Image (tube, rainbow, N blue to C red):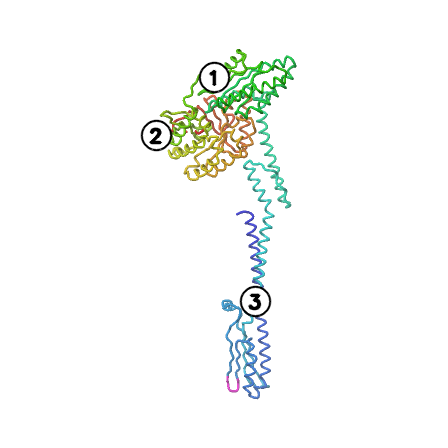
Amino acid sequence: MTLFKQIYSLLFGLFVLVMTSLAYFQFTETRNFMANQMESELNNASTSLSLMLKPHLQTGDMVAAETLVNVIFEGGFYRKVSLTWLANKQVQEWENPIVVEGVPQWFIDLDLFTSQSSETVITSGWLQLANLRIEAHPGLGYQELWRVMNNTLLVISVLFLLSILVLHFRLKTLLTPLNDIAIHASEIAQRVFNPDMVLPKTAELKTVVEAINSMSGQLKQVFNTLDNEVDSLRRDNLIDGVSNLPNRQYLTGQMNSWLTEPGYGGLLLVKMDWLEEIHSKYGYQVRDETIRVLALRMQEQLPSIAESVIARIANTEFALLITKGERQDINLYLQALIRLINQEMSKAGCVPNRGFAIGVTERDGDMQASDLLSQADNALQHAATANKASSWFDSQHLQEFNREQWRDRLVTAINQNQFVFQWQSVLDCETNEVLQRELYCRLNIDGKQVRAGQFMPYVELLSLGSQLDRCLLESVVKQGILNINNEPVAVNLTHDSLQDPEFHTWLAAFLQKTEFAEQIYFEIPEVAANNNLAECIHLAELIRAGGAQLGIDHCGRQMGSLSYLQQLKPHYVKLDQSLAFYSNNQQNNELCRALINIAKGLDIKVIMTAIENQQQLEQIQSLRTAGYQGYISAPTDVLVQDVQVTAEVY
């Protein structure tokens, strides 16, 4: 029971007790008063009537005596009058039934007034003439007692209602700060730091609010400090000091991570010898300022054409990794880059289209970072040798299908649930027990199993992501994959699903009717959380309301703040694979540690990824993550009722 209800109940009980006592006191006092009043009236009437009857009794005038008694009896104050003549023992009686107007019969039947009577012997000297007995009528007592109690109860009821209303609103006003304190404390426990609470007027609550505000501010400062530490470590280890662009180490980690997933894009290597000309003419300070301006303009203009990572990898060399873009997008990106470089050369007094070369290569199938860099470097060398602004690496790779052919095949395979599933275990760092299984899928297209790395780029290009996720989730439930093992199954959602309101509505209904909803973990990439935070928050609420859990994939890949974790409140995060690459460097281990500390401070489990062997596993033990994942425990086929089916969704 809440404090409000307890205080309300206590005051309500005390009020009822006081009002009941008051009503009882009023009732008993009124009844006693009326009883005494009837007794006094009865005695007075008996004495008066005896004196009035005496002359008529002395003369034996029975008619006059009866007339006198009738006059008094008709007043209605007496229930029964009995006159006994002692001379001849003749008895005369007058009697009224107990009928009281305006008083319910049940109240009369309570017998609240005892029978009262007065008996008097009328004498003349020493001679006894008659015996007069008068019994009081209780009607007047019942009427007066009923009237008084009605008025009393009416007043008490009005006071009761007014008191209840005043008490309710007054208590609500007084306890509002306490309720705010409880909500604020609960939000602090969930690592949500709102602005300081307004100090209440109540002295005791004021002290509590001050303590809560202080605690909230200190905890917020701790998390801000950790976030700043992550940013500082990134700048120290992964940012080029001159251009404020990511350095070679960051670029390599991003390429390694990007190439392990399905995707499409390319790499541009740029060598700008004209910067050395600036150096020789004006010195390194002017050159560095030129690099800063050039880097700023590249960051402002190029990412709007295609998603990219821009890095400075040497004094006069830059690398631009396009993480999502087709060949025509890369070409537009290249042309914009050439225009930008020429503009800056003109400002610096250099001749445009000279003194720089760009090598371009496109991602093709399964590639390693070294392959991509080698191809881009070959293209760069060809451009420099041929004295050209840019050159493409010609892989002479022919696409198996064009876009429309991919659309037809993908739509058919998805709608017919041609999924083949595999899953990979996420293991506990201490016990090596399975924490969850991440689900990967392939599609049967034209009788062949096509890996996600081949078809997912076209799923994104053709905006088929939400359709894929719907059919995949339905297939997972239909094939009973959720109840094969006790461990939850992690499913990666596509970018289309995150931004599709219809998919959100469908997912809410799907989770409500799914028996094993608590066995599903939905993963969204960090880039989506940063770029579409509002949609992700809404999706996270739907997922939790349906009984499932939310996870963040590729945590730490982006260079921005981790404040989104406080708003999304995921169940766990998976550190980006690039951080496993960084772990070879002790300083970068500190970056991992800072990221882990932020997540743990928000009560979020941390899973390390890209753990390939026992040596890597031993290296991350000191980080004390909740779990790890990688080819140290390779993906395995999912077997459902002796039918081979495959476990992830991108």
Say which element carries label 3: helix
**Residue at 50% over, 75% down:** 97
| Residue corresponding to mark 1 | 371
The amino acid pointed to by label 1 is Asp
Tell me the mark number nearer the camera, choosing from 2 and 3.
2
Which residue ends up furthest to the bottom in the rendered image? Answer: 59
| Residue corresponding to mark 3 | 147
Residue 422: percent from left, percent from top: 40, 28
Image side of residue 489 versus residue 126, left or right: left
Q: Calculate the distance from the C-alpha at mark 2 to the C-alpha at mark 1.
A: 38 Å
Which residue ends up furthest to the top in the rendered image? Answer: 385
Q: Calculate the distance from the C-alpha at mark 2 to the C-alpha at mark 3.
A: 88 Å
Predominant SS of the magenta segment: loop
Which residue ends up furthest to the left in the rendered image? Answer: 642
| Residue corresponding to mark 2 | 643
Crowding at mark 1 (Cα within 10 Å: few <14, some 14-19, many 20+): few
Q: Quadrant of residue 59?
A: bottom right
Q: Earlier in the sequence, mark 2 or mark 3?
A: 3
Q: Calculate the distance from the C-alpha at mark 1 to the C-alpha at mark 3.
A: 104 Å
Q: Which residue range is magenta in the image? A: 85-90
The image's mark for residue 106 is none
Residue 218: percent from left, percent from top: 61, 34
The amino acid pointed to by label 3 is Arg
Q: Earlier in the sequence, mark 2 or mark 1?
A: 1
Tell me the mark number nearer the camera, choosing from 1 and 3.
1
The quadrant of the image that shows the C terminus is top left
Image side of residue 443 versus residue 49, left or right: left
Residue 105: percent from left, percent from top: 50, 68
